[in-house]
Amino acid sequence: MSSIRNITASTTVPDDLAKRLGPSGVNEIILTLWQGYHDLIADTDITISETAMEDDITLEWYGKISQRWANGNRATTLRINNIGPVHQYPDPTLKKSRGYKPTIDFCFRDWDTSNSYFGVECKNLYNHQNDKIKRYVETGVKNYTSGRYGSQSSESSIIGYVLSGKIPEIVAELVSEIAKITPVNNLSRELRYVEPQYSSQHTRDIDNQEITIHHLFFDFSH
């Protein structure tokens, strides 16, 4: 971990990993996220209950993604050799003078550039629990719009672990909450995916750049 913490910027020009990957590369990452979810669901040795802790789900899911990434040799497919998933990555971008660096749940990190990654932040969601809806926006969406996470990428993602209720109802609640922070475009279904995946567009505070957040909803309610 110390090697990660000691990385310093070699250039002041942000290296936008999402733009380097292009639409097909971002799509490859997102497909890997979905495949990891289905691998997790299919694993009979893992039970995810309504009371499951967010970090515990993420750790199990991250293990499945890492297997998929390595077995599929995805880095070669993307033509970026030094890219891969990293768990609990400390992002130094908006680090305060004292205290810890903000830590994203995990990301796909390009180790050849300074702090360039595709972020993956995870949040538990439940039926009719408005506090979790607010938390999804306050510590999920806003972490990207503030530049706290993913400040060098024009695209990132949030994963909603749906532990009770129906995804369309939860999405409707999120639409109302996200509307309060005046998005460029609120949640809308990404029709190229058969999975329950949405996207929203926002203006990032630190540089006024328009960013896209992909919202993937994993159903663990059954």
Image (cartoon, rainbow, N blue to C red):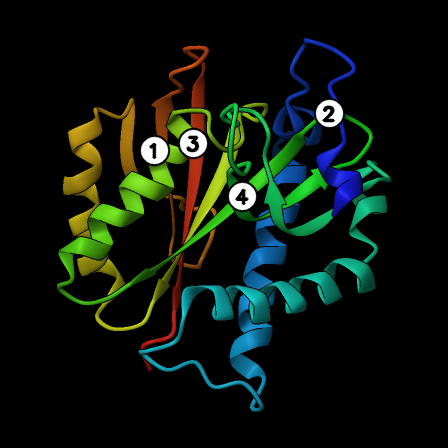
Q: Does residue 169 appear to the left or right of 72 in the view shown? A: left
Q: Does residue 1 appear to the left or right of 156 in the view shown? A: right
- Which residue in the structure is indicated by mark 3? 144
Q: Is residue 131 above or below residue 212?
A: below
For label 1, the SS is: helix
For label 2, the SS is: loop
Q: Does residue 221 appear to the left or right of 212 in the view shown? A: left
- Which residue in the structure is indicated by mark 1? 142
Q: Is residue 195 above or below residue 99?
A: below
Residue kind at label 3, given as amino acid type: Tyr
Mark positioned earlier in the residue sequence (4 or 1): 4
Mark positioned earlier in the residue sequence (2 or 4): 4
Residue 114 shows which numbered tag?
2
Quadrant where the C terminus is found in the figure = bottom left
**Circles 2, 4 touching at the beta carbon (< 8 Å):** no
Dot in front, 3 or 4 = 4
Q: Position of residue 9 (x, y in %)?
A: 73, 18
Q: Nearer the viewer, residue 184 or 180?
A: 180
Q: Position of residue 170 (x, y in %)?
A: 21, 57
